[in-house]
Amino acid sequence: MIKKFWGFILLLGLLLNLSIGWAAGELTIIAPRGGHFDLQHKVMKYYADGSRLVEARWKESLITGRELSDNRKTKKRAIPSARILKAFELTVDVTQNHLTASQKVTLYYDVSTFAKCNLLDWERLANFMKLTGQVMIGYQDWIIKGNQIDAHLDKGLFIVYGPVEAFNKLNSIHGGKLIFDQANRKAIISDNAVVTRGGNEMAAPEITYFFDTNQVLASGSVRTKIIDESE
């Protein structure tokens, strides 16, 4: 009875440490098949149950809005942006403030952007994620694929290492590296960058593509091939 009591106290202490260490992100974890808890090293493992994946939810104050203050002047305020991470297995190292997600990993960054991979490492204090294994980003009607993604969440930057391919119904982009600037809704493609639309093609050392306007900015020596002038 005494052992069970002290075991409960240790587990409670571990959970309290978890809530303190991750309080900035308001992290909540749901594990359909429970988990394994190493009380000595403060490491938690959570498991999915078939199609019911482990789910982690948190909020980041990244979206900027405006409101009226008492003196009727406008001021900026931070609006919490909900984030969701799903995976087959989730490991949390409380001491190191580090999270690892593996198998069937999906990160829902916001309503317009998600990323998928086989393995995700999250350095919580730096707000940095590394995604490897069949990585993919979905943004609006675009799909971006590569070998690895370095995600700087606080800046809205996703660096995709290639070869990289990005495409939607009308356009395709290829290169060795792509910086997806989600905050400014643009992509910077380098290392033999090529943008294709219909039969038309543009190649340059570096190309910036603006998602909102479909405009292209090419830097360096540019080579173009125009087949259909209506495009």
Image: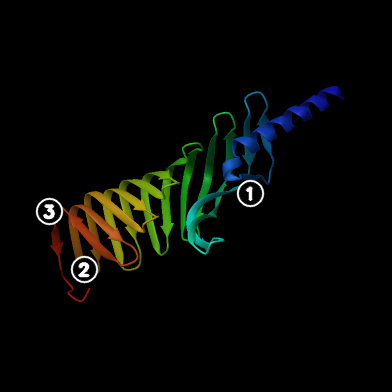
- Mark 1 surroundings: few (<14), some (14-19) or many (≥20) residues within 10 A: few
| Residue ID at (38%, 61%) | 142
Left/right of residue 78 with respect to residue 16 in the rendered view: left
Q: Do the residues under discs 3 and 1 have CB atoms within 8 angstroms? A: no
For label 2, the SS is: loop
Give the amino acid type for the residue marked by disc 3 in the picture.
Ser
Closer to the observer: label 3 or label 1? 3
Q: Which residue is mark 2?
A: 199
Tell me where residue 1 sits by quadrant. Answer: top right
Q: Which residue is mark 1?
A: 50
Which one is in front, 213 or 73?
Answer: 73
Tell me where residue 38 sits by quadrant. Answer: top right
| Residue ID at (40%, 65%) | 141
Which coloring applies here? rainbow
Residue 193 at what x, y percent from top left? Answer: 23, 53
User: In the rendering, which numbered label is found on residue 24?
Assistant: none
For label 1, the SS is: loop
Q: In the current view of this chain or complex, which residue is farthest to the bottom?
A: 230
Q: Earlier in the sequence, mark 3 or mark 2?
A: 2
Give the amino acid type for the residue marked by disc 2 in the picture.
Gly
Give the amino acid type for the residue marked by disc 1 in the picture.
Gly
